[in-house]
Structure formats: structure tokens, C-alpha cells
Amino acid sequence: MNSDEIAEIAEHWAVARFGMERAPTGQWGHDGTLPDGRTLQVKSKKYGAHSESAAYVDLSEEVMRSADSLLVVFVDYETGEIRDHIGPVPVDEVKDITTKRKRYRVTMNRLRKISSDNGRAGRD
């Protein structure tokens, strides 16, 4: 599976799990809207990856301006199964991360802490 297919799986899971209504194709900054009206950005990550990129997620300034919440979905690239998730977490809680080349880098450990603090831990 390629990264576009994995992203599509993650977004469909967000629809099924959280009731997200998908944004129109080409929408910048968020992938959909939750039933309570919050906009949601869905990021997919390879489950079990041990590369440096598996330890963080990068968010553009557009996402930081447009999305209210962030959901990270860990997908098994071989089977397409959802193995874990973090969030949704409020984007406001990650806005203090320093930018590098107009991107915000947030570690998975930080996102898990925010998710846990907000009662939104993954694995279900």
C-alpha cells in the first residue's frame, strides 16, 4: 500500500469511529468536521515503524490555522488494519511547538500525553 491509500483508510476510519464528515476534495487545512462542529486533521502513520519519522508528526501553518483537532491513526501497511490512534487532541495544545520551515513538529510522546490528559487515549 502507498501513503495515499493509507491516508484514505485513516480518513474512512475517522468517519466510522468519530462520525467525521469528510471535507470536500481539495480542502486545505483539515480533512473533515466532527459532529460537534470541530474541524479535524487526520494524519496516518505506519504502525510499528522504527524510523525517525514515526516519532513525530509535522503540521503545516495552514493546518494550525484551520483545524481544531488532530487525530493520528497508526495503520498496518501490509494489511490496512488500524492498530492504534492518538486523539483527537486540540490543536491549540500543540501550538507552542517551535516552527521549522513553517511547519510544526510534534512528537508522538507529546501527543500521547495531551491525549491522555484529555481522556482520549487510543487502542480500541
Image: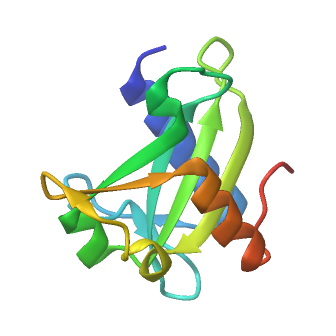
In the figure, 3 relative to 61: above or below? above
Looking at the image, residue 73 sits to the left or right of residue 42; the answer is: right
Tell which residue pokes out farthest to the bottom in this image. 36
Residue 26 in view here: yes
Residue, far right: 124
Residue placed most toward the observer, 48 or 27:
48
The reply, left or right, for residue 52 in relation to residue 61 is right
| Image color mode | rainbow
Residue placed most toward the observer, 101 or 59 = 101
Residue 93 image position (x, y, % from top left): 49, 79
Measuring from the top left, give residue 73's x and y in whole percent.
60, 45
Give the percent coordinates (x, y) of residue 104.
30, 59
The quadrant holding residue 16 is: bottom right
Residue 27 in view, yes or no: no
Give the farthest residue toward the front: 98
Looking at the image, which is closer to me, 61 or 6? 61
Question: Does 60 sit above or below residue 85?
Answer: below
The relative height of residue 42 versus residue 84 in the rendered view (above or below) is below
Q: Residue at x 51, y 48 (%)?
A: 11
* Residue at 42% across, 66% down: 32
x 63%, y 37%: residue: 74
Residue in the image at 60% along x and 21% along y? 49
Residue 66 percent across, percent down from the top left:
27, 75
